[in-house]
Image: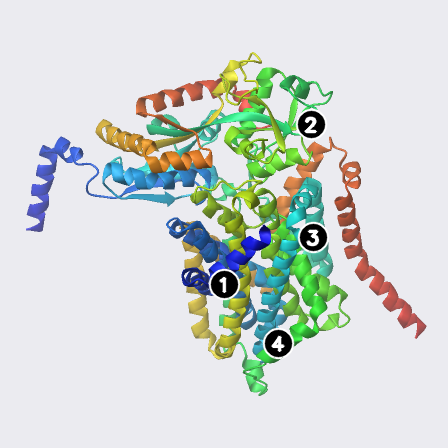
Amino acid sequence: MKTLLKTGLTAVALMTGSAALAEYPADDNITFVIPYSPGGGFDTIVRQFAPALEEAMGTTVVPENIKGAGGTRGGQAVHRSDPNGYTSGIYNIPGLTVNEVTGRDQGFKLDEVTWIANLAVARYGLAVAANSDINSVDDLCSMGNPAKMSDTGASSTASVTTRISFGIMGCEIVDVTGYSGSNDAMIAVISGEVDATIKPISSLKKYLAGDGSGDLKLILTLTEEEAVPGVATVTDIGHPELAKFTLNRVIGGPPGLSDDVVAAIEEGLRKASASGAVTSWADGAGVELSFMGSAETKAMMADLATFYQEYKDLAAAPE
Amino acid sequence: MGLDTLLDAFLAILNGGSLAYLAVGVILGLTFGVIPGLGGTTALALLIPVTYTLEPLDAMYLAGGVMGATSFGGSISAILLNTPGTAPNAATTFDGYPLARQGKAGLAIGASATASALGGLIGLFTLLLFIPVARDVVLSFGSSEFFLLTILGLAAIAVSVKGKLLRGLIAACVGLLLAFTGANQFTGDTRFTGGIDYLWDGIPLVPALTGLFAISQMIELSLKGGSVADEAREAAMMKISGVGEGILAVLKHWPVLLRGSIIGTIVGAIPGLGGTVAAFLSYSSTAQTAKDRDTFGKGNIKGVIAPESANNAKDGGSLIPTVAFGIPGSAETAIFLGILVLHGIEPGPQILLQNEREIYGLIVALTASAVGASILGLIFARLLVLITRIDVNIVVPVVVTLSLTGVYVLEGRMADVLLTVLMGILGYLMIRFDYPRLTLVIAFVLGEIAERSFHQVRLISDGQVIEYMLGRPVSVILIIATLITFLLPAMRNIRWLRTNAAE
């Protein structure tokens, strides 16, 4: 009887394949893999989006932290999951892009991931201590000895950005890595241990005059257009290509995810992104929401791969 | 401004709802503390998703309750089973366990509870005093000071292993080897990973320590059989109580308490060092300078007071970087800041201005928890002591199951469990062949920070490391402290030779 029932059900499922998909995501929870620990930036954005996404999609969304191996273990878990739309994850971009370009085996290929959406973007700024005599990139690059910068790990996106952008500008620097977090890296600038640091503008703001404590001074934003009033942009200094350096919160799924499922999740995320709960959280936390759909995200990923490929040698960590 | 908020936070605790969160926190903290393998960080990490739906202030009471109670909870297993409930309690086993075997577990628990509560209070009081200068304190500790502190810690290990210098050095080198596993902070290359992805992020601390301390001790106990307090029972020395004496012992040895608390506060303020180093430094400085230093390791009550006071005072200290810049001073405060982030609060240098309620709420919760956990502990001490009379064939399976489950729960990785077992075997071999385990652990904890901060100093000083260090006042103080640590035993020997020659 059971076997008969199973066969019957399979037959029905086969016949009404598209109809069954139209019901997605009715019959199961959607798992969202976060490749880092609870409480960090990636975890927070997923947990902030989850309730709004549940409402938009009409099913339960379960955030799951699978950390380890520099954020690749979570990506591997998504990669191995069934392409049925019930497992997707958030990716550290361009961190993973840089890893791939510099030849590190991450256990999965980025161009095989089904890119669904981009939720937020962080733009970088260059800051020095508020009481420093340095007021521009020119000042920083003509101190007589190479300027010292502070960063977390050598393979962190900020460190890669620092090495490549100063390389492009033809300015010699020493990137002092090993600080425990981006806050510690900024404090090293305040205490005078290093000269400057490149960090997301939203993080730097806490230390700038006005909104923040006034310990740091912003001298450049890595944006094409003016992002902070009165602060020079990379267009102003003749290197608009440096605006390509951003930090993205990208959502992807396993290879072979069907277009219908992608469209459904994309639509859910789009609604969630515009919801009051998410926008007011983003305002308070200084997160720049920047929603991109699947096609746009896929194009961005390809674009980033080409961009970092070009600066592969600078991207590789120093010996 | 600050005091008003502090008072408000105290009054809020009396409000029924908040008190309930705090009480739940304390009970969770004690439980997670007692069980080897589970600790404050595990408890807090598991609580994060739960706190998401709570008011930020209630989340702080819950987190504070957990943070304040785990270290005392951990000392109970350290004393009764020679198995530190949390890594920082490792130093408590040196004298706590011998006391338990002599049938004086009540005395040790009483002293540990009192030292924990008072140490916690002193640490938090110091924090309140330090709030106005917290910024300057944090800014005066740069890479150079971090490096020198790790050297001071390693120096303290070197002199603490009396008569076992070579074994101590071997254990320390193994600790360094473990510390250097994983991605190199500077080049991004991976070291000693043997192609295993698991090792990319280095060897995780909690499974390694659970194996080295808990599993190894369980192997030892099960091979030995009987019960912990067998010798005492045979000698008819078993005392069920002694808790009151323990409380008095702490008051009598108040200089030990005070020194432990100060060391705990200072070490707590340095991100990355944590309670294990604080408790160990407090223990070794007490043991090195005491007149009756020969009795340490054989059941000296000061050997319980010193690490436990430091262990609780470090929570106050670890909030110094937090109030100054919104950065964590310990794994627990990192999770606490994570909870704030989840509530849409971005911690930063103005945390004390913008989130005064949450910070003072946490401080009050920590204080209430340290005291509350100790009172609970004292009430139940009589019952707990009975554990030492239970046959090890019952104790061992329970502890092993709980610790391995705890290790698995933290990250949900089977590899962590495997690592715990391997470390347990290593730890047992070390017990068997008389190699000091704590030496390995301190080197393991300090190794990574030492390497990282040395590279930083090298880059910052353009290679002129010594000149750079000598130009920084705090660095000079640390260099002098390290020299004293090395010279103290030598000077003592010279004095001993002289007095002997005179006779």
Chain letter of disc 3? B
Pair 4/2: label in front: 2
User: In the structure shown, which secondary structural element does the residue marked by tag 3 occupy?
Assistant: helix
Q: Are marks 1 and 4 in contact (CB under 8 Å)?
A: no
Q: Are marks 4 and 3 in contact (CB under 8 Å)?
A: no
Q: Tell me where residue A74 sits by quadrant.
A: top left
Considering only order in the chain, which callout, 3 or 4, is on the residue closer to the N terminus? Answer: 3
Amino acid tagged 4: Gly
Chain letter of disc 4? B
Q: Nearer the viewer, residue B412 or B433?
A: B412
Amino acid tagged 3: Leu
Q: Residue at x 29, y 32 (%)?
A: A271
Specify whether disc 1 shares its chain with disc 4: yes
Q: Above or below — where is B111 with respect to B35? A: below
Amino acid tagged 2: Ser
> Residue under circle 3?
B154
Specify whether disc 4 shares its chain with disc 3: yes
Q: Residue at x 63, y 19 (%)?
A: A137
Specify whether disc 3 shares its chain with disc 1: yes
Image location of residue B138, percent across then percent down: 66, 44
Amino acid tagged 1: Gly
User: In the structure shown, which secondary structural element does the residue marked by tag 4 occupy?
Assistant: helix
Q: Label 4 vs label 2: CA separation?
A: 56 Å
Q: Label 1 vs label 2: CA separation?
A: 47 Å
Q: Tell me where residue A100 sits by quadrant.
A: top left
Q: Label 3 vs label 2: CA separation?
A: 37 Å
> Residue under circle 4?
B246
Pair 3/2: label in front: 2
Q: Residue at x 62, y 76 (%)?
A: B246
